[in-house]
Amino acid sequence: MLIAIDFNSETPIYTQLCDQIIIGIAGGILQAGEPLPSVRRMAADIGVNVNTVNKAYTILKDEGYIAIDRRSGCSVSAKIPPVDEKFSDELRKRLIPIAAAAACRRMGAEAFQSLCKKIYDELGGQL
């Protein structure tokens, strides 16, 4: 999987890395059980500090997207948890500013929903 980090973005690098891995999982590029590069290897490959990758991997582990085993390393989790109240609340918090920006630009609710559905479908939303 190719990780694309925008070093000029205001989005923290660890967040970009998390997002790229989650997109890879949703799009089927990364499969359950597939190994991920070690923290050091990933840091070297994308040219960032080891602590940045460690933070991203820790977040992904805490959210259930990856599994970390001291013996075998990091891999895509075979047991990504289903939607729960905590996830729904976090998703809502992240969507509010996006929906607000769309509303400020006078994007209608149907157009916004259509765009969301298109993106979801492109990522493999039929899972």
Image (spheres, helix red, strand yellow):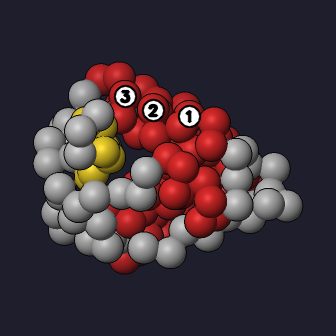
Discs 3, 2 touching: Cβ within 8 Å: yes
Discs 1, 2 touching: Cβ within 8 Å: yes
Task: Place residue 123 in its image quadrant.
Answer: bottom left
Q: Position of residue 52 (x, y in %)?
A: 64, 41
Which residue type does callout 3 highlight? Asp
For the residues labelled 1 and 3, the Cα–Cα distance comes to 11 Å
Residue under numbered circle 2: 58
Q: Residues within 10 Å of mark 1 (few under 14, many from 20)?
A: some
Asked if 113 appears above or below 94 in the picture, the reply is below
Q: Residues within 10 Å of mark 2 (few under 14, many from 20)?
A: some
Residue found at x 18% / y 57%: 32
Residue under numbered circle 3: 62
Residue in front for this viewpoint, 83 or 98:
83
Residue under numbered circle 1: 55
Secondary structure category for the residue under label 2: helix
- Mark 3 or 2: in front is 2
**Quadrant of the rendering where the N terminus is positioned:** bottom left
Task: Place residue 7 in its image quadrant.
Answer: bottom right
For the residues labelled 3 and 2, the Cα–Cα distance comes to 6 Å
Q: Is residue 103 visible?
A: no
